[in-house]
Each structure stands twice: as C-alpha cells, then as structure tokens.
C-alpha cells in the first residue's frame, strides 16, 4: 500500500515537473508575444487637431519607421520626441498629441519596429535603435541635444531612460515608468524565474542614476499594470532637478486632463 502511494506520488511529481518545464519553455520562446502588442487597438475615434507630417525614419539595420512630425519653430522652441508604450498604434496617442498644439513645442512620435505597419520585430535592443534613429533624424534637421526632450510612455520609459544616460538633453518625461521589466513581470508571473528567462529587461532603476537632465515622473496610484510604487521609486532614485505629477485616481492610462497638461506645461516652462 505504501509502495503504491509512493509510486503514485512520484508520478504526480513528475507530471507537475514536466508541466512546469513545458510552461517555462513556452514562456521563453513566446515571451515577446506577451510583452509587445502591436495589434491591440484602443483607438477611440479621436480626430487629430494638430498639424502633423507623416515621415519615414531609417534605422541602421535598414528598417523604416513611421513617424508623425510637427514642426512649429525649431529655432525658438524645444523639440519633444515621444516613445510610446507596448501596445497599439500612433492613432492611440491622438488624444495626447492634440494637447501639444497649445504648447510652444515641436514634436516627433515614432512607431516601433513591428508596430503601425513597420517591418521588423520588437526587441529591447531594437527599440533602443529605433529611439536613437529618431534622435539622429532630428539632429539632421538641426535639433541640438540641449533643445531635445525625451518623452517615454510606459514601455517607452525604458527607451527614454536608456538614451538619456550621460547626455545633455533639455529634459526627460516619464509617464507610468517601471523599475525594470523583471520587476514588472514578477507581478504577473510570481512562480516563474523571470530573471533567468526574460530577454528584454529594460532596467530603468539602474539607468536613471546616469541621467542628469531635468526629469518629471507622472504616475497614478491605482495603476493596475505598473504599480505606483515603481514610479515613486524611480522618482526617488532620479537626480535633481526632478519633479513629480502623482495622482490618486489615475490607472495605467493616465487621464490627459487640465491638471496633467498644466503639470507638463510647468515642467516645459522650467526648461527655458
């Protein structure tokens, strides 16, 4: 009786082990499909009310990126380059971009490789290259480093913090930033050794220390995807001068209301 119990227990343990191993293998090879969602669409039908020009930006690995470019006055106003999050298209950011028409600023927003009809597949290093290519494109138009502002949204904060290291940019805007992708993944996969399996780690908490440009961190306390504690931690680690826009009722998609826009305007004004 005892031997039969031991045999059944051993079989159960082996089944659990192989199932767990299968899950690990699946997650390892499928992980980027879980991280990047180019086909997710939360487009609400917003109409763009700021003048934009559709541009193509070439990367060093021969990928053409779709960009929307708004030029108000390169000489007198700073230029903002916008790095969006892990889901959706450029159209999903129209409700934010429309607010920029009331701000004296030029801007460029790019779609990542594999997003908005772009070729290629998104990876951490690939996104860094995309972001750098956007900055290089603006540099060729005469935008100086000291007049450039990097704006990172969610996943885009990983690109913004990486590229802002040891640079003299005018400023850095981080909307709903995370400490690292490992930390974020552990929330959804607590029983998985994500630190060993994860390919794209985006270690913001390490890189933020190397940024000396003025920073504003924006985050809502009820964020259900990236905990508010991560945004607060990034703010605490960041060097001065730094500013925060923390709200009690914003989820991961922050409300682009008058208060947020005013915080952005105040930050941008402080850079002049």
Image (spheres, rainbow, N blue to C red):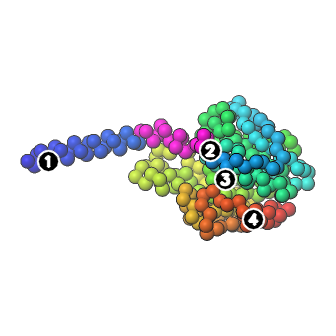
Q: Nearer the viewer, mark 3 or mark 2?
A: 2
The residue identified by callout 3 is: 153
Q: Identify the mark at residue 41; answer none if there is no mark.
A: 2
Q: Nearer the viewer, mark 4 or mark 3?
A: 4
The Cα–Cα distance between marks 4 and 3, rounded to whole angstroms, is 18 Å
Q: Nearer the viewer, mark 2 or mark 1?
A: 2
Earlier in the chain: of badge 3 and badge 1, it is 1
Earlier in the chain: of badge 4 and badge 3, it is 3
Q: Where in the figure is residue 159, as x and y percent of width and height? A: 66, 48
Q: Residue at x 62, y 50 (%)?
A: 155
Pick out the residue farthest to the top. 62
Q: Residues within 10 Å of mark 4 (few under 14, many from 20)?
A: few
The residue identified by callout 4 is: 258
In this orientation, which residue lies closer to the viewer: 252 or 56? 252
The residue tagged with tag 4: helix, strand or loop? Answer: helix
Q: Toward which corner of the image does residue 258 lie, by quadrant? A: bottom right
Q: Where in the figure is residue 89, as x and y percent of width and height? A: 67, 43
The residue tagged with tag 3: helix, strand or loop? Answer: strand
The residue tagged with tag 2: helix, strand or loop? Answer: loop
Earlier in the chain: of badge 4 and badge 1, it is 1
Q: Identify the mark at residue 5; answer none if there is no mark.
A: 1
Earlier in the chain: of badge 4 and badge 2, it is 2
Asked whether, in this view, residue 9 is left or right of residue 20, the answer is left
Pick out the residue farthest to the front. 45
The Cα–Cα distance between marks 2 and 1, rounded to whole angstroms, is 52 Å
The Cα–Cα distance between marks 3 and 1, rounded to whole angstroms, is 55 Å
The Cα–Cα distance between marks 3 and 2, rounded to whole angstroms, is 16 Å
Q: Main secondary structure of the magenta part?
A: helix
Q: Residue at x 30, y 45 (%)?
A: 16
User: Is residue 26 visible in the rendered structure shown here?
Assistant: yes
The magenta stretch is 25-40
The Cα–Cα distance between marks 4 and 2, rounded to whole angstroms, is 25 Å
């Amino acid at each position: 009786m005892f031997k039969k119990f031991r045999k059944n227990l051993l079989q159960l343990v082996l089944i659990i082990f192989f199932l767990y191993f299968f899950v690990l293998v699946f997650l390892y090879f499928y992980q980027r499909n879980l991280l990047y969602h180019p086909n997710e669409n939360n487009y609400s039908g917003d109409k763009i009310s700021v003048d934009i020009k559709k541009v193509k930006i070439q990367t060093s690995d021969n990928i053409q990126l779709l960009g929307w470019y708004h030029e108000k006055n390169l000489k007198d106003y700073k230029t903002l380059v916008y790095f969006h999050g892990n889901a959706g298209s450029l159209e999903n950011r129209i409700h934010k971009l429309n607010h920029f028409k009331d701000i004296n600023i030029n801007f460029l927003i790019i779609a990542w490789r594999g997003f908005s009809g772009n070729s290629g597949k998104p990876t951490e290093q690939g996104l860094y290259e995309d972001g750098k290519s956007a900055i290089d494109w603006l540099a060729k138009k005469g935008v100086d480093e000291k007049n450039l502002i990097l704006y990172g949204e969610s996943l885009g904060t990983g690109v913004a913090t990486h590229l802002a290291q040891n640079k003299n940019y005018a400023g850095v805007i981080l909307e709903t930033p995370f400490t690292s992708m490992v930390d974020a993944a552990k929330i959804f996969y607590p029983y998985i050794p994500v630190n060993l399996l994860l390919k794209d780690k985006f270690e913001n908490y390490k890189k933020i220390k190397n940024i000396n440009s003025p920073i504003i961190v924006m985050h809502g306390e009820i964020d259900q995807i990236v905990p508010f504690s991560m945004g607060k931690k990034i703010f605490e680690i960041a060097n001065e001068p730094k500013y925060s826009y923390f709200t009690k009722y914003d989820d991961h998609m922050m409300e682009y209301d008058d208060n947020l826009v005013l915080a952005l305007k105040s930050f941008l004004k402080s850079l002049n």
